[in-house]
Image (cartoon, rainbow, N blue to C red):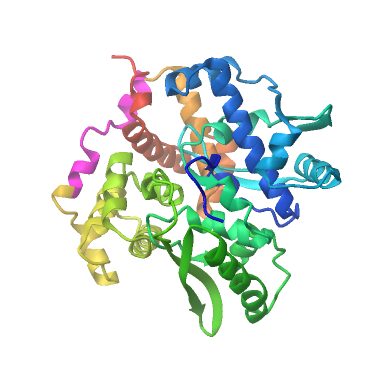
Amino acid sequence: MKGTDKSPVLRKHVSIIHSDTSRSKWGLVQRKVVNSLLLRARETIIEAIGSSDKEKLDEYLEQTKGKEINYEIPLQRLKKDIHFDSNDHSLIKEALFGLATSAIEYNIINSRGVKEWAVMPILSYGKLVDGKVYFRFPGELREELLYPSVYANIDLAIQNSFISTQSLALYENVYRFINVGETPIFPVDTLKRLLGIDISSYVEFKAFNTKVIKKAVKEINAQSNIEIVEVELKRTGRKVSGIRFKIKPKTAYKVLEDTEAKIEMSEYEYALHEFGITKKQSQRIFDRLSIADLEERINAIQTTLKQRSDIDNPAAYAWTVLNAEETPSASQAKKIASKPSAESKLVIEGKLPFEEIERRASDELMLKLKDMYVSTMSSKRTAKDKDLHALAASGKWDDDAVYNSFASFVESTMYIRRDLMKHLTD
């Protein structure tokens, strides 16, 4: 079914699109209900404050922080949103029950630029009475759910054309990248989780491909406003380890204009943030490189930084690799690490040394930076980083290794997060 100019459109946070629903066993009705409730909650708040202006929305969020906020939607509106024609409401009740009792996993980049893993149900409350559905979102997720900075637009008319749960889930995950033309490579197990399938199912990739992927691609191509033109398989040896989808809009269908590639790059922006690359610089990289090229360069930078302890300026090194005409070979990367380009040195212009930051920072700011450091290190995977996280989490900030790591983190964070700089005293 083709979306129309009058179709309800949901700006959906990618953390919900890119969430693991395999354990909660979300069905098609639950996925559609979530989209309808998110849309209605956002409409309710905009109606209440009389504006969609960001400053007013931010003010509202600040005023309601920590409060339990209930929303409501007429049952008939919900049924229309999800294209549900039956008077048997048991499926809707079952969907609400599942959404309120089944936890799913989220990966969110919070307001401090730190990647968070969280597990919770998407609804903390649901009730159906007198022709209305009353519902509530967890306070921890409400801001990200209702006012996402990283999102994809989902046309509810198009979602209702799907008859398969996996087709809708795959559509949402690939549509995020419509203006890029291709998705990142999804590891097979990750893709299963995103489609709500247990990783122990379809052990043989051939079965997964035939019974799930090909059927979902066929339905997406027949029913939606995009076309998956190629399914690229990445192999490790003879085994399929990852999948990339190449996509394009259908010329006769409306593609929502503000589903922009530049705001769909959260995973990559997070990686560049860790290198010390600013948001503005990241956007320049996104505009220039394809996803495949960007992934390759990020992987090359991460590998080199793990192997080399003598790179004094990781941001300058990363900037040079990202701006090279081609992805550098191992020998070229070594030369870059030893002698960054003149342009790359601009990356650290204005960066304050840790000693000065520590001298000018309030106790409150230093506590916040320590909290950010502990949160960031919790997502690291190397043994060294895990040790640093354990030491920092237990308050051993005087340890030399923790001190040096934290100092480097603070210098990069304060450079990137200009909003924190204003808290430094003169």
Residue furthest to the bottom in view is 238
Q: Residue 365's quadrant in the figure?
A: top left
Q: Say left or right for 159 vs 340.
A: right
- Nearer to the camera, 242 or 423: 242
Residue at coordinates 62% horizontally, 71% vertically from top-left? 215
Q: Say left or right for 83 vs 157.
A: right
Count of numbered circles in the view: 0
Residue at coordinates 47% horizontally, 40% vertically from top-left? 402
Q: Was residue 335 drawn as part of the magenta stretch in this picture?
A: no
Position of the N terminus by quadrant: bottom right
- Nearer to the camera, 33 or 67: 33
25, above or below 393, in the image: below
Q: Is residue 103 visible?
A: yes
Q: Which residues are magenta?
A: 344-360
Q: Position of residue 357 (x, y in %)?
A: 34, 25
Residue furthest to the left in view is 342
386, above or below 217, in the image: above
127, above or below 194, in the image: above
Q: Position of residue 322 (x, y in %)?
A: 27, 56
Q: Position of residue 36 (x, y in %)?
A: 65, 39
Q: Was residue 357 drawn as part of the magenta stretch in this picture?
A: yes
Give the prevailing secondary structure in the magenta stretch.
Answer: helix
Position of the C terminus by quadrant: top left
Residue at coordinates 71% horizontally, 57% vertically from top-left? 22
Q: Is residue 378 visible?
A: no
- Nearer to the camera, 14 or 332: 14
Q: Position of residue 408 (x, y in %)?
A: 37, 40
Residue at coordinates 18% horizontally, 45% vertically from top-left? 345
